[in-house]
């Protein structure tokens, strides 16, 4: 039976219900032989169902991702705030350490300046004393030279 008309004629000429059932079964058998992939064919209804299921799954995944993204944002914000606090603490510690070092350096510089002033004053005193040691005898010598010139005149 290669056509629908032949199937109809075979069904119409079948003497009883049992013969008709056999003709129908043979027609199905030939149909399955001719189209072995027929049970695997997808209908539009199946496609719509699959599409709806996939759409629902996509929406669920999208919702899950949105929730997870918000959770991660919260976690990242928390970590950033913690890091900011730690950095601020470290900066304050560094500032305190730098201020302490600056004060120490100022003290050391003041001490060195005072030492240098003392050394300079000592050198000036020595120079003055040395100058006076030479100046006083020269003054007496000048007075004596002037007196001797006055006697000669």
Image (spheres, rainbow, N blue to C red):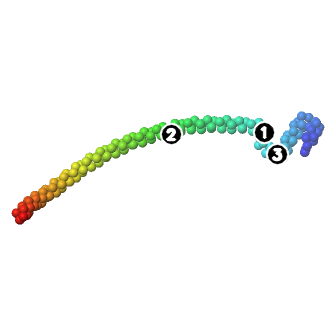
Q: Earlier in the sequence, mark 3 or mark 2?
A: 3
Question: Which numbered disc, 3 or 2, marks the residue closer to the eye?
Answer: 2
The percent coordinates of residue 76 (x first, y second) are 50, 39
Quarter holding the C terminus?
Answer: bottom left
Determine whether the residue tagged by mark 1 lies in a helix, strand or loop: loop
Mark 1 burial class by Cα count in 10 Å: few <14, some 14-19, many 20+: few
The answer to whether one can see residue 137 in this image is no
Mark 3 burial class by Cα count in 10 Å: few <14, some 14-19, many 20+: few
Q: Report the residue marked by disc 3.
A: 35
The Cα atoms of the two marked residues, 2 and 1, are separated by 48 Å
In the displayed structure, does residue 132 sit left or right of residue 40? left
Pick the residue in front: 60 or 131.
Answer: 131
Q: Earlier in the sequence, mark 2 or mark 1?
A: 1
Q: Residue at x 82, y 45 (%)?
A: 35
The Cα atoms of the two marked residues, 3 and 1, are separated by 16 Å
Q: Residue at x 68, y 37 (%)?
A: 55
Q: Earlier in the sequence, mark 3 or mark 1?
A: 3
In the image, farthest residue toward the left:
151
In the displayed structure, does residue 72 sit left or right of residue 47? left
The percent coordinates of residue 41 (x first, y second) are 78, 42
Mark 2 burial class by Cα count in 10 Å: few <14, some 14-19, many 20+: few
């Amino acid at each position: 039976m290669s056509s629908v008309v032949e199937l109809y004629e075979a069904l119409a000429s079948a003497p009883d219900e049992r013969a008709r059932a056999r003709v129908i079964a043979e027609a199905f058998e030939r149909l399955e032989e001719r189209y072995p992939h027929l049970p695997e064919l997808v209908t539009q209804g199946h496609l719509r169902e699959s599409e709806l299921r996939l759409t629902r799954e996509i929406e669920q995944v999208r919702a899950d991702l949105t929730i997870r993204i918000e959770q991660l944002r919260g976690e990242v914000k928390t970590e950033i705030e913690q890091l900011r606090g730690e950095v601020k603490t470290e900066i304050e510690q560094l500032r305190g350490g730098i201020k302490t070092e600056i004060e120490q350096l100022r003290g050391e510089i003041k001490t060195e300046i005072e030492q240098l002033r003392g050394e300079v004053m000592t050198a000036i005193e020595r120079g003055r004393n040395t100058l006076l040691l030479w100046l006083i005898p020269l003054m007496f010598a000048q007075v004596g030279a002037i007196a001797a010139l006055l006697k000669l005149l």
